[in-house]
Image: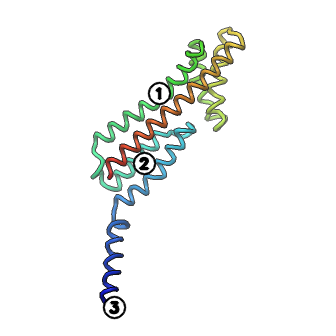
Amino acid sequence: MQAYVQIITDWFSSLYTVTLANPHVWGFLASLPFIIGGLIGTVFPALPGTVLILVGFVTYGLITEFDKLPAWFFVGQTVLVALSYLIEFLATAFGVKMFGGSKAAAWGAVLGSLLVFVLGPIGIIAGPLLGAIAGELIMGEQIKQALHSGFGSFLGFMGGVIANLVISGLMIAWFILEIL
């Protein structure tokens, strides 16, 4: 009977050592809300998606004393974050240009994206669309061209979301490869 008790005690002791006493487990659990929030922010840009993902990685690093995440990992991740914002900015403008929109429509779409702070989640889609339309109308274009440019801004925005999802996936995959 004592042998069974010892086996069970040893098993619980090793389970504790592998899980609850392991800072990597705690670091991963603490980073998860940031990573999940970042993925949500990638699809709904009211949240800074890739920045939140990076904050999750930093949280993991702080808890584990950066023993599995070297400095070059954070440099690379920061470059990916900057790339995600550049793509987000350029994708909307590119969508407007692909549909024959003017520079005013492209700038209107980019500035219209700030409506997310006024209109909330609906401003994510409506802002660039309305901004591109307003930009064209201010420049004296016909309503048909203005709507065409607005549609282009929406398609560009959606392309930016897809690109940001890919970048977010790369960031997370790289993180997982580093910590395993």
Q: Position of residue 21 (x, y in %)?
A: 34, 67
> Distance between the Cα atoms at labels 3 and 2?
46 Å
Mark in front: 2 vs 1:
1
Q: Which amino acid does the dot numbered 2 rest on?
A: Gly
Q: Where 164 falls versus 5 (above or below)?
A: above
Amino acid type for the residue under numbered disc 3: Met
How many residues crowd around disc 1 within 10 Å: few (fewer than 14), some, or many (20 or more)?
many
Q: Secondary structure at mark 1?
A: helix
| Earlier-in-chain disc, 1 versus 3 | 3
Numbered circle sitting on residue 87: 1
Q: Is residue 164 left or right of residue 96?
A: left
Front of the two marks 1 and 3: 3
Earlier residue among tags 2 and 1: 2
Pointer 3: residues within 10 angstroms few (<14), some, or many (20+)?
few
Residue at the (64%, 21%) spot, across then down: 150
Can you say whether 90 is above or below 28 in the image?
A: above
**Is residue 121 rendered to the left or right of residue 73?**
right
Q: Residues within 10 Å of mark 2 (few under 14, many from 20)?
A: many
Q: Which mark is residue 56?
A: 2
**Horizontal and vertical percent for residue 173?**
39, 44
Q: Residue at coordinates 50% horizontally, 43% vertically from top-left? A: 39
